[in-house]
Amino acid sequence: MKRVKPFQACGHKMTSLDRFVLIFVLAIALTLNESRKVIGKRHGDAIFSKHNVYVGNDLGEGVTLNLRCASKDDDLGTHVLPYGQNYSWGFRSNFWGSTLFWCDFKWGNVTDTFTVYDDNNSEQYYHTNAHWLSRMDGLYYYHHHYGEYELYHNWGNGHKMTSLDRFVLIFVLAIALTLNESRKVIGIRHEDGIFSKHHVYVGNDLGEGLTLNLHCASKDDDLGTHVLPYGQNYNWGFRSNFWGTTLFWCDFKWGNVTDSYSVYDEDSVDQSEHTDTRWLARKDGIYYYRRPYGLYELFNNWRK
């Protein structure tokens, strides 16, 4: 289904400049692909490789798991998992091989945080899927080699920061500050540069008894499918990439409607210059919150 960018007309024909940009981007991608192989990255498909993480609730009947997962760039929101259910998401490893996701686990009197994907973990990096189960005694990881789940982490045994951790943290902050200054030099819009964070909110305002099925993603991150009763919303946070090309879209399904729209586009000045982007699904179409007017405005009618 065709993705429609906010505030941009459809039916654009490819110009000479478009073709040049496309060829240039493909050339850069191929160059990065080869350079990853040269410096020893493990995946044959390199920057195009994709991973999926699954976190399940195996705590027992009647025990609910509250799960919040994130990386340094993406906040995947909070999810309430009944016993027997899981939450999953997909993403691509970054070029530097430093992708890391962690989750906050809350159930009963337990509150804990643990890393669920780390590019530096060869077991996880070699395989496209990382599977975890929350059980009463701790967090279990599925070892592909043995074909079974194995206790990986007891609840409450947090990781203490070592000298190496502190060095890495300081080094990363120094790099981030350098990139921040370079963004200002080349004219990126946000004053807070790579530290700027955006949130997107998509709400169900269809009416009593109508449920909205929502599936949102970017080219790198699949945020999964969410079922929203009337009056509820789904939201997530992320940081714009250095190149200013961040784009998220959502698939909307309700009644006999199936449609797809771009819900965040770095090229939209109205969206990129504000930290919050808000949408409402209503019976006649998708509504966008316009700050200058302080109200929701019909953005597009549903395509049936």
Image (cartoon, grey):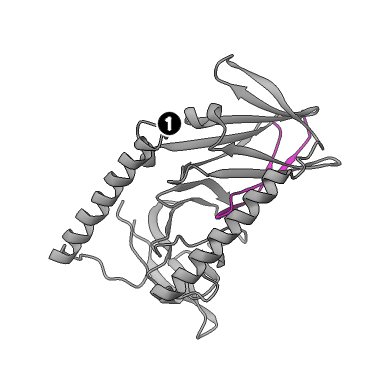
Q: Nearer the viewer, residue 42 or 9?
A: 42
Majority secondary structure in the magenta region: strand
Q: Is residue 203 above or below residue 87?
A: below
Q: Residue at x 35, y 31 (%)?
A: 44
Q: Residues within 10 Å of mark 1 (few under 14, many from 20)?
A: few
In the rendered image, which quarter is residue 3 located in?
A: bottom left
- Magenta segment, which residues? 61-83
| Residue 294 visible, this angle | yes
Q: Nearer the viewer, residue 284 or 18?
A: 18
Q: Position of residue 71 (x, y in %)?
A: 58, 50
Q: Residue at x 30, y 55 (%)?
A: 2
Q: Position of residue 143 (x, y in %)?
A: 59, 21
Mark 1 element type: loop
Q: Position of residue 212 (x, y in %)?
A: 52, 53
- Furthest toward the bottom, the residue is 293
Q: Residue at x 35, y 65 (%)?
A: 5
Relative side of 118 to 153, left or right? left
Q: Which residue is mark 1?
A: 42
